Amino acid sequence: MKFKTSAVHASHFEDLNAGSVVNPLYLSTTYERDKEGNLAPRGYVYSRLDNPNRSGLEVKLAVLEKGAEAMAFSSGMAAAMAICHTLLMPGAHVIISDDCYHGVGHLVKTMYTRWGITYSEVDMINSQNVEQAITANTKLIMVETPSNPLLKIIDIEAICGLVKNKNIAVACDNTWATPYIIQPLTLGADFVFHSSTKYFGGHSDVIGGCVIVKEKNDHSQKLREYQMIGGAVPSPFDCWLLDRSIATLPLRITAQTESAAVIAAYLNDHPKIDRVYYPGLTSHPNHKVAKRQMKEIYGGMLSVLVKGGKKEAMDFANHLSIFKHATSLGGVESLIEHRKSVEGDHPKSADNLLRLSVGIEHIDDLLNDIKKALE
Ligand SMILES: *Cc1c(COP(=O)(O)O)cnc(C)c1O
């Protein structure tokens, strides 16, 4: 089935009791056994281990990412941690991108170093940088594209090509692109993880995460064990909300991309804006890779450098009324966030970077909001 159809139907389980068209919500923490004490026919025991809403959501996630199996977690960070915890032993080396989500960077750079795990932080735009960072102990490469907040485009296929026949896993944080735009497992990645809080949730009302594996093997079993025993699991209601929201993911992201492209082009020509970071602009340094990898759907996220400094950037953000000044992304409502001390291809001291998450409001209203705020 096509993506849009699976996004609606892939999680459905038959409700023998009432014939409900929508998956019913199972809040029960425990499930009755048969007279001999064996598991109930569907295999549910206790809700941390599994429950109908979580398994329905996981089937949908696996189908959409073209993976063998999915595990839902209580947050994106719990999902990232599940991958690290099950793959890395003391002495292992991890390669992360120099522009990855700060929480993932913090996890690897601060928390895992306590356990004798080392890391390299590299600019992955050029896959040679990744190749040079590989050591005999490298076990994991974490890729995130478009990156946060500079929207760097990393060639997933090229990175996966580097580790063929080596015992190194590639995990892609696919939160920003979503499987509607990029399916990293089909490009050679071993794992995909998400903050489901963002585009999957889409309505800024649920925190969640997930890991999707390319194949079922010893490691996928370890991940499942980590999910059940580690206990960072989402509630049945959070799974139900995510399942419902993912049904409209293709529609939302299409609308968000359309508006983001218009806004990026407008800001790109605006005299008060120094630079726009959006992979759909032909001026984006890796536009060519983006065009191939993102199938010309460039997503609803962009960043801008406002001319001047922090004051000018904050003035712009604070004069918007439809765009709310808040963190997070991927929701139906437009958000803007000031990001400070960004490293990368512009000065570290730059305090004039704003990141925009474009929602599904009417483009005329969004453009007017921006026009007025810049005046
Ligand atoms: C938000 C985010 C995370 C962390 O997810 P939580 O759900 O907040 O734990 C990880 N990666 C990216 C790209 C994110 O945007």
Image (tube, rainbow, N blue to C red):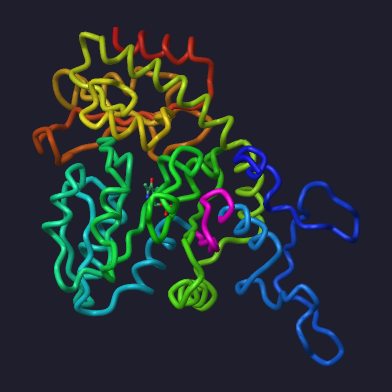
Is 100 placed above or below 204 here? Answer: below
Extreme residue in the front direction: 165
Q: Quadrant of the N terminus?
A: top right
Q: Residue at x 62, y 42 (%)?
A: 245
Is residue 120 covered in magenta?
Answer: no
Query: 195 or 111, which lies in front?
Result: 195
Residue 185: x and y, percent?
43, 54
Q: Residue at x 60, y 41 (%)?
A: 3
Residue 201: x and y, percent?
55, 44
Q: Residue at x 18, y 18 (%)?
A: 274
Query: 58 or 73, which lies in front?
Result: 58
Horizontal side, residue 313 vs residue 356: left or right: left
Q: Quadrant of the C terminus?
A: top left
Residue 199: x and y, percent?
50, 40
Question: Magenta segment, which residues?
Answer: 62-74
Horizontal side, residue 375 vs residue 324: left or right: left
What is the count of numbered marks?
A: 0
Extreme residue in the bottom direction: 36
Is 158 placed above or below 261 here? Answer: below
